[in-house]
Image: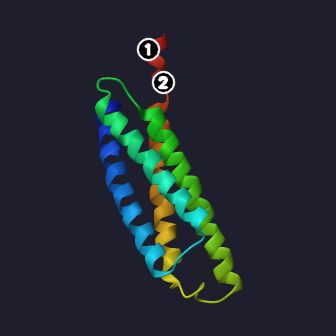
Amino acid sequence: MNKRSIETVLAWFSIVAELIHFAGETAYQIRFGQYLPMLIVDYIAVAVLWLAAWRSLRCRPQSAAGLLCGGWGFTFCLNYITYFGRLQRQQIAAATINGEPASVINILGGLLLISGTAFLLSLWLANPDESRYQ
């Protein structure tokens, strides 16, 4: 499988992941509520990654791996701070955080692993092929 094929799979995965991200954030907002800037930054992550995936699928035969890398990097950092922020509050407070179930930490941990893996893959895709320059 060549890099362009992998990029295509990652682009489609990004679209699906961000649809789930959007639905999950919206459902969380309705159920528990959150500080508006925190919701907006999640929606920015959704928009950036959706745009990167759309561009990647439309620019054939060129690549938009750099855009995917930026989108996944942003999403990974967002998941990182969310996961460890909640983990710290959970350790301090108790098994619940403002009425949210403790299982949210497990979900966020899984999302952190997924976004980290996608970010590393997109970094590899965005790295220029050294053999082209020799």
The residue located at (30%, 46%) in the rendering is 12
* Tag shown at residue 128: 2
Q: Nearer the viewer, residue 117 or 44?
A: 44
Quarter where residue 83 is shown: bottom right
In the depicted view, which residue is nearer to us: 124 or 24?
A: 24
Q: Describe the element under mark 2 as helix, strand or loop.
A: loop
Q: What element carries label 1?
A: helix
Residue 88: image location, x then y, percent: 68, 75
Q: Residues within 10 Å of mark 1 (few under 14, many from 20)?
A: few
Residue 18 visible in the displayed image: yes
Question: In the rendered structure, are the residues bearing label 2 and label 1 in contact, judged by CB atoms less than 8 Å apart?
Answer: yes
Q: How far apart are marks 2 and 1 (CA)?
A: 8 Å
Q: Residue at x 60, y 84 (%)?
A: 97
Quadrant for the N terminus in the image: top left
Q: Name the residue under label 1.
A: 132
Q: What residue type is labelled 2?
A: Pro
Q: Residue at x 41, y 62 (%)?
A: 21
Near mark 2 (Cα within 10 A), the count class, few <14, some 14-19 or many ≥20, is: few
Q: Which residue lies furthest to the top in this view?
A: 134
Instruction: In the rendered view, tell whether residue 93 sits above or below residue 84.
Output: below
The answer to whether residue 2 is visible is no
- Residue type, label 1: Arg
Q: In this view, does 94 lie to the left or right of 123?
A: right
Q: Nearer the viewer, residue 37 or 18?
A: 37
